[in-house]
Image: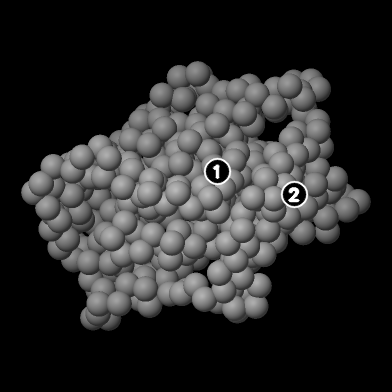
Amino acid sequence: MKLTVRIQLMFMMFLMFVTWGSWYGQMSKYMLNQLNATGDQVGNAYTAFSIATLIAPFFVGMIADRFFSAQKVMGIINLLGAVVLYFLIKITDPAEFFWYILAYTITFTPNLALSTSIAMNQMKEPGKEFPFIRVFGTIAWIVVTNIVGFLDIGGSVEIFQISMFSSLALGIFAFFLPDTPPKTTEKPTFGQILGTDAFVLFKDRSFLIFFISSILICIPLSFYYALANPSLSASHMTNVENKMSLGQVSEVLFMLLLPFAFAKFGVKKILIIGLVAWIVRFICFGYGDGISSEWILYIAIVLHGVCYDFFFVTGQIYTDNKAGEKIKSSAQGLITLATYGIGMGIGSKLSGIVLDHYKISEGVFDYRAVWMVPAAIAAVVLVLFVLFFKDNQKDIKVA
């Protein structure tokens, strides 16, 4: 790959994650502080992202992959996204806000598949080359959340203004990316898009248990994305966004440890470590305090790397190896739809309901009780997984 192309792809990934990271973790604080939203309305807003995730594969599979170059589709949807955000920042009614954030996420979520397609189309060895490009997305998330934190705008409309301008920049820049022509002129079936070809994997009981566990663990994962920021702010932690970015730093570090972990522990123990980390993390969020025991909150934040890499990234690699070349794409598509679409959709809705249930007064919530709910869900998943998952491969190929 030419250096100029590599730089283009790195910048594409950076802009895309700036666009996403500027608002995603902070949206709940913004809605609670500026829109006086209820917990349920906050949960609905995060559910919008899951709805968009379910829609995106049909858009990419039935339109983008058949008729247009991927980089042109990326350019158009990001320009549309910037327009939607322009109107979104003017909204003051939390109920109306839902429809605008849904419209925006429908324009954004196809980026996740399109960016991968554009990048891998330029690579001779995607397994070796793609991680270096993808890591600039994590770097972007760290950079933008630190900017938000230093400027102290996590609960302000500026988070969407940053996203609007970066979306505009990505929309223009995308037209100058390397050409990625349509992959096929044949109309894909719903089954191909949904990944139902991978249903054959369910004959393996361990994979079925892993699949169910992946959906269920996304329920507590949604609590983290939706409620961590306002919870930490309520605990009197300062510079919340800056400190939360340590979670992404740990994500990079533990990603580097994965190959060694596979060789030493095998897939089952790694997945169990990830599940235990989720339970510990939620308990730390519940019992930490920004004044007297901030170190407990730091543990909760830094555990993000273990939680995410040791379960979700490990799960992706495990799925890849189980599926084989023929149904690899279908299997990954199925996992993505099930987790980010169904699991996180249920979790986002539930997080809002739980937040309202533990409301003490206007703008005040019993976050300790709130965090015990996802901790309990993660504990149930852990028991299910330990009892029924039997696969313990150690010879998994890590790209």
- SS type, badge 1: helix
- SS type, badge 2: helix
**Residue at image point 79% right, 20% down:** 361
Numbered mark located on residue 279 in the image = 2
Image spot of residue 375 (x, y percent): 74, 42
Give above or below for 220 relative to 169: above
User: From this viewpoint, which residue is outermost toward the right?
Assistant: 292
Is residue 245 in view from this perspective?
A: no
Residue 13 in which image quadrant = bottom left
Q: Is residue 60 left or right of residue 47?
A: left
Name the image quarter holding the C terminus. Answer: bottom left
Q: Amino acid at mark 2?
A: Ile
What crowding class fits label 2: few (fewer than 14 Cα within 10 Å), some (14-19), or many (20 or more)? many
Q: Amino acid at mark 1?
A: Ile
**Residue at image point 46% right, 74% down:** 397
Give above or below for 304 relative to 337: below
Judging depth in this view, the residue of 197 and 27 nearest the camera is: 197
Image spot of residue 77 (x, y percent): 26, 43
Q: Give the CA separation, mark 1 to mark 2.
A: 18 Å
**Residue under numbered circle 1:** 212
Is residue 120 in view from this perspective?
A: yes
**Residue at image point 39% right, 54% down:** 332
Q: Which-is-in-front pick, marks 1 and 2?
A: 1
- Is the C-beta separation of discs 1 and 2 under 8 Å? no
Judging depth in this view, the residue of 148 and 298 nearest the camera is: 298
Name the image quarter holding the N terminus. Answer: bottom left
**Residue at image point 53% right, 26% down:** 44
